[in-house]
Amino acid sequence: MIRCGLTIVFLYMVCWASAQQDPVLMRINGKDVLRSEFEYIYNKNNSLAGVEQKTLQEYVDLFVNFKLKVAAAEAAGMDTTRAFREELEGYRRQLAKSYLTDENVSEAAARKVYDKMKAGHRAGQVLVSHIFKYLPQTVTAHALRSAEHQMDSIYAVLQSGKVDFSSCVSTYSDEKESFWVSWLQMPAEFEDVAFSLPTGEVSRPFFTPQGIHIVKVLDRKEILPFAEVKSEIIRWQARHHGSDKGTEALVERLKKEYAYTPDKAGMDELFLKGSTDKRLFVIDGREYTGEMFVPFAAAHPQGVKRQLAGFVMKSVLDYEYTRLEQKYPEFRMLMQEYRDGMLLFEISNREIWERASQDEAGLKAYFTRNHSDYLWETPRYKGIVLHATTKQVGKQARKMLKSLPEEEWQNAIRLMFNAKFRQVQAEQGLFAPGDNPYVDEKIFGRGKAETMTSFPFTTLLGEKLKGPKTYQEVRGAVAEDYQNYLEKCWTMRLRADFKVEINQEVLKTVNNH
């Protein structure tokens, strides 16, 4: 009883100490936000280049608004949809890759391979063309001899100089295009030949697992910098060895951390009989049995010892995968940031962006209420400038356009005056001073416009305005302002609907503890 009481006291002290190290800074809609999460976001955003720096109190307001929108998305069930969960898990898998390998070991192993490449004859890339005959694994002996004889004959003709290599490729090869070869991309037999040939030389016929080849090297490139090929080398090592060196090193460390313990009886029975129901090993107190091994073995057909080694490695990594948030604060923060960002986007799209882009009545009403905000500093001229071949044509065009809506002016001019030959040249739009010399002269009284030789008679139709008549003329600006208005109203509703509590004493310790 005494020991039980001491255990409870100890756990309470651990929890209390943890809470003191990372106390609750605020509670939004009943959900705690720790100081560490706020500090992470605050410091990250305040360090971004080109972003206006915010004071602590300014950022508190922004952060609370952000969390309120996330709370609204959660209340709407957006975090429970299948699409959301799958995208979040996909991001987690991608993010976890760097945590499930020892990157220093991986890089060192890749560097060793790279240095070997650089020192050897396989450095860089070679551009090759080849005469290639595909040979399936089931090729008969007769077909094999026939293909070999044909390629020997082609090589002899090439050596005689009677035909060029490209024509033989075009006539005989199953592969017509030239291509660049880097080390680790082609079978070793192919690379041995391609990298050993001088530029312009042609190889003797040779076999690879794909078939029979005659290769010509067309060009060479220097080896790429290590940073550009490192990832490809690591992937190559994983393909050829089942895992890269960094993953193997990590697994060995995790085995010690999680007290990996093999069970000799279960393993011996598995090696002897090929299956067992017994325990195979223990990881951090969790048992892994022969029954759990069966589906892994079925998906990885190879020797039992290699299967078991692969199963142990996968089990260790899978267990580590479940504990990343607990072990690595930065991983937890990144996952939280991505999750909240997804929810913010979805709820903002629904509440603001889609509405602002589709709510024509709302845009019109907002523009009407705030018309004075869109007045121009200087008047503008909305209309059309008509350049005509004769004065009479100009008058006729102007008279006709007066009776038509503005959106039909250009089409009417094309049909009535320019169908057979061009009599009118028109420029329609919203003109500010300096945009059009004819508008400047006739409307704004500025400057003198030159007469057009082919269209010497100019007349205008339209009106001078202090500001736009409809929101469509300044739709982009109105839509942006309307979005801001919708967001402001929405934020006010959220602050009224959801409870926000901020611990001011903890706030004083942000970046100061």
Image (cartoon, helix red, strand yellow):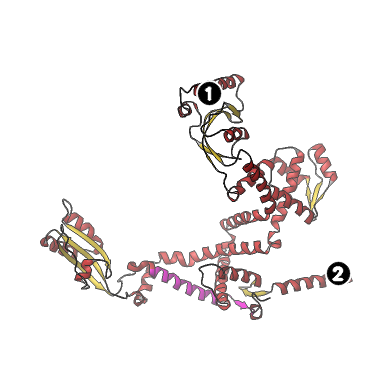
> On the image, which quarter does residue 138 sit in?
top right
Give percent across and percent down for residue 350: 49, 64
Q: Where is residue 462? Give x, y as percent.
A: 22, 68
Let me know if residue 502 is in the magenta part: yes
Region rendered in magenta: 477-503
Say what amino acid the circle numbered 2 marks. Cys
Q: In this rendering, would 511 be left or right of 395?
A: right
Question: Which quadrant of the figure has residue 259?
Answer: bottom right
Badge nearest the viewer, 2 or 1? 1
Instruction: Residue 310: tell me if it is visible.
Output: yes
Residue 155: assigned label: 1
Mark 2 closeness class: few <14, some 14–19, many ≥20 residues within 10 Å: few
C-alpha span from label 2 to label 1: 87 Å
Question: In what element is the residue under mark 2?
Answer: helix
Q: Three-letter amino acid code at disc 1?
A: Tyr
Image spot of residue 471 (x, y percent): 34, 69
> For the point 32% across and 67% down, which residue is it?
473
* Residue position marked by numbered label 2 in the rendering: 4
Which residue is more in the foreground, 128 or 313?
A: 128
Whether residue 5 is in magenta: the answer is no
